[in-house]
Amino acid sequence: MAFESLTDKLQNVFKKLRGKGKLTEEDVKTALKEVKMALLEADVNFKVVKQFVKTAEEKAVGTDVLNGLNPAQTVIKLVNDELVAIMGSETDEVSFKPGKAITVIMMAGLQGAGKTTATAKMAKRFKNKGKKSLLVACDIYRPAAIEQLRINAETVDVDFFSLGSDVKPPVIAKQAVEYAEKNGHNVVILDTAGRLHVDEDMMAELEEIKKTVDVHQTILVVDAMTGQDAVNVAKEFDEKVGVDGVILSKLDGDTRGGAALSIKAVTGKPIFYCGMGEKLDDLEQFHPDRIASRILGMGDVLSLIEKAQESIDIDEDKSRDMAKRMKKGQFDFEDYLESMKQMKNMGGLAGIMGMLPGMGMKASDIEGMVDEKKMAHMEAIVLSMTPQERRNPKLLNPRRKFRIAKGAGVDIAEVNRFVKQFEQSQKMMKQMGGNKHGRGMFGGLGGFGGFGGGRRPF
C-alpha cells in the first residue's frame, strides 16, 4: 500500500503519547509537528497539511481523555477525523442517467497513467451492477491503445467499438453512441488519447468530444506514483475541460500516497476508485474512512469482507462441508487447492494480512514472513498428485512422493516436509475442534496459511 512510510511515522508519534493522563498544549504541538512532517514527506499538498494541523490543534488542545480513551487514542481519533475530512467525508460513486437513457462517460488522463486499463476495470464493475457497457477506442494516435482496449474488453466480456485510427475522435464518439442506442447498451465509455504532459491539442479534442456527444461524466485517471504532480494534473484538467471525479491508479505501488490525501482538498473533486493492482479485478471503490483506517494501521476489515464476497465463488453446501471436515481434521489436499485459489483471488496472503487490524506490519515485514515462492512450490506439489492422492493423503508412500517431487520440480525432502506439516495441521485442527467461523477461504487460512514460510502468520 502506498502509505507504508506514513503509517510508520504516525505510529511512532502515537507511541510517545501513551501513558499520559491529559493532553497538554505542548504535547499536542509536539505530536502535530511530527504529524505535519510525516504528511509533507508523504507528498501531501502543503496547504492541505497546514489546514490539517491547524484544525487538529484547535480540537485537541486541553482535551481530556474522552470516554476512557488514552491520549494516544484521542490523537489517533483526531488525526483519523481530519484525514477523512480532507479526502472527502462521503464515499462518492459514478452516477448514471435514469431509466433507459445512455450514460456517456469520458475517460481522460496523461499517457501512462493507466487510463485504458482503468476503463476496462470500471466496465467490469458496471457489469456486476447489471449495466451493459460499450468500450470505445478514441485514442487514434496509438494503435497499441486500440488493441489493448479491445483485448481488455474481451477479457471482461463487454462490447468494444472502434473505427480505427483514421477517423476523428468526436466522430467516433458520435457513431459509438448511435451504435449503443441500436444495440441496447446503457453505458458508453470513451477511452480518449493521453499525452506526456497537458497540452492545448489534447484539451481541445476533449472539448470537441463534449460538444459532439452528451458526456454525462468526465473521469480523470491519475497515477498515484507521481505524487503531487497528480494533484496538479487534476487541477489543470478540471480548469480546462471540467472533471467530475478521479480514479487514482497504482495506489498499491511503493509510493508516498500524497495524491490520495490532496486531490479532494485541492480540486474539490472526489476520488471514485483506486487501482490496487494490475488485474482487471483490482479496482476498489475509494472509501475515505477506510483509507484513513489503513493509514493509521487499523486495518480495513470492511473492504476485506467485500473483496471476499466479490472474489470468492464457493458453493454454500461445499463451504459448510469443508468447515465440518476441518473441525474433524479431515481436510485434504483438494481443500488446500481451494483455499489457495480463493486466497489468490483476494490478492494473496500478504494482501489479506495488510488489511487486518492490529497486524502492525509493513508489506516488507509480511513478505519476509510469507515466502510466496515456497507457497508456489507447495501448490506445484499438490498439483503433481493424482486426484486420489489429494483426497486420501495416506496413499503417499515413498515411491509416490518421489514421483510427485519429480513432477513438481522440487527435492523429495521438500515433499516430505510439506506432507508432515499438512499432517500436523490436521492434528492441530482436530484438537482445536476447528474454527467455528471457518468457512471457505478463511477456514483454509487457519489450516494452510503457515505453509509458505516456515512460520505461522496467525
Image (tube, helix red, strand yellow):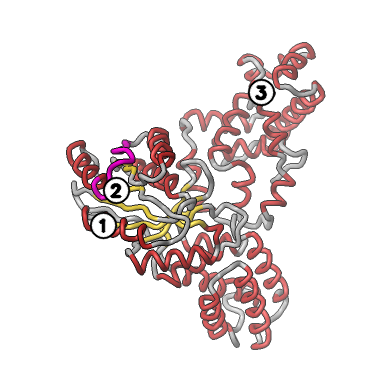
Q: Judge by depth and name the residue closer to the eye, 369 or 236.
A: 236
Q: Amino acid at mark 1?
A: Glu
Q: With respect to residue 432, does 418 lie above or below?
A: above
Mark number displayed over residue 169: 2
Which circle marks residue 208 in the picture? 1
Closer to the N terminus: mark 1 or mark 2?
Answer: 2
Q: Residues within 10 Å of mark 1 (few under 14, many from 20)?
A: some
Crowding at label 2, few (<14), some or many (≥20) Cα neighbours within 10 Å? many
On the image, the x and y values in percent for residue 359 come to 67, 55
Q: Nearer the viewer, residue 373 or 253?
A: 253
The answer to whether mark 1 and mark 2 are in CB contact below 8 A is yes
First-in-chain label (2 vs 3): 2
Q: Left or right: 375 with respect to 260?
A: right
Q: How far from the left and from the top, in percent, is residue 124?
A: 39, 42
The residue type indicated by label 2 comes to Pro
- How far apart are the two marked residues, 1 and 2, measured between alpha carbons? 9 Å
Q: In this rendering, which labeled residue sits more in front, label 2 or label 3?
A: 2
Instruction: Answer whether residue 357 is magenta in the image.
Output: no
Q: Secondary structure at mark 1?
A: helix
Residue 382: give its label.
3
Q: Residue at x 60, y 58 (%)?
A: 255
